[in-house]
Image: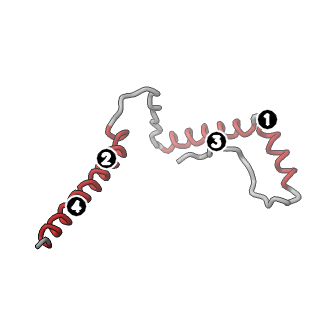
């Protein structure tokens, strides 16, 4: 689970809170000074050292940008195809049932 979200840091204030402008100013200063990125980096390094010290395996291999398609990549497309084929089969069966009923009702 990611520790930090890839969005801007902030506080939840009501729109007309008197402290909002002050906090916005201070957060902007921290961002411009690079402190937020520095704190993120320190936190990640500390988490990694703690995990190594406890024996947890941190073995994340970044996937290559260009790779062959696998079944995991295509699974949703196959499921969608099966769903659409199932709808077509249901329509086919319903049409055949309707034709048989009309055929039996003819004098």
- The picture quadrant where one finds residue 104 is bottom left
Q: Is residue 78 left or right of residue 6?
A: left
The residue wearing badge 2 is 81
- The picture quadrant where one finds residue 78 is top left
Q: Residues within 10 Å of mark 4 (few under 14, many from 20)?
A: few
Comparing marks 2 and 4, which lies closer to the viewer?
Answer: 4
Comparing marks 3 and 1, which lies closer to the viewer?
Answer: 1
Report the residue at 45% width, 36% height from top: 59
Specify which label sits upstream in the sequence, 4 or 1.
1
Q: Which label sits on residue 95?
A: 4
Q: Residues within 10 Å of mark 2 (few under 14, many from 20)?
A: few
Specify which label sits upstream in the sequence, 2 or 4.
2
Specify which label sits upstream in the sequence, 1 or 2.
1
Marks 2 and 1: in contact by CB < 8 Å? no
Query: Looking at the picture, does residue 68 appear above or below residue 5?
Result: above
Q: Secondary structure at mark 3?
A: helix
Q: Which label sits on residue 32?
A: 1
Comparing marks 1 and 2, which lies closer to the viewer?
Answer: 2
Report the residue at 45% width, 40% height from top: 57
C-alpha span from label 1 to label 2: 49 Å
Comparing marks 2 and 3, which lies closer to the viewer?
Answer: 2
Q: Secondary structure at mark 2?
A: helix
Say which of 80 and 92 sits in front.
92
């Amino acid at each position: 689970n990611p520790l930090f979200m890839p969005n801007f840091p902030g506080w939840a204030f009501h729109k007309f809170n008197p402290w909002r402008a002050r906090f916005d100013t201070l957060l902007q200063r921290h961002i411009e000074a690079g402190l937020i990125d520095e704190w993120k980096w320190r936190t990640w390094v500390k988490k990694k050292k703690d995990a190594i010290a406890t024996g947890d395996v941190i073995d994340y291999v970044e996937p290559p940008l260009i790779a062959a398609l696998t079944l995991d990549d295509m699974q949703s497309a196959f499921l969608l195809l099966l769903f659409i084929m199932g709808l077509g089969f249901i329509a086919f069966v319903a049409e055949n049932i309707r034709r048989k009923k009309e055929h039996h009702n003819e004098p």
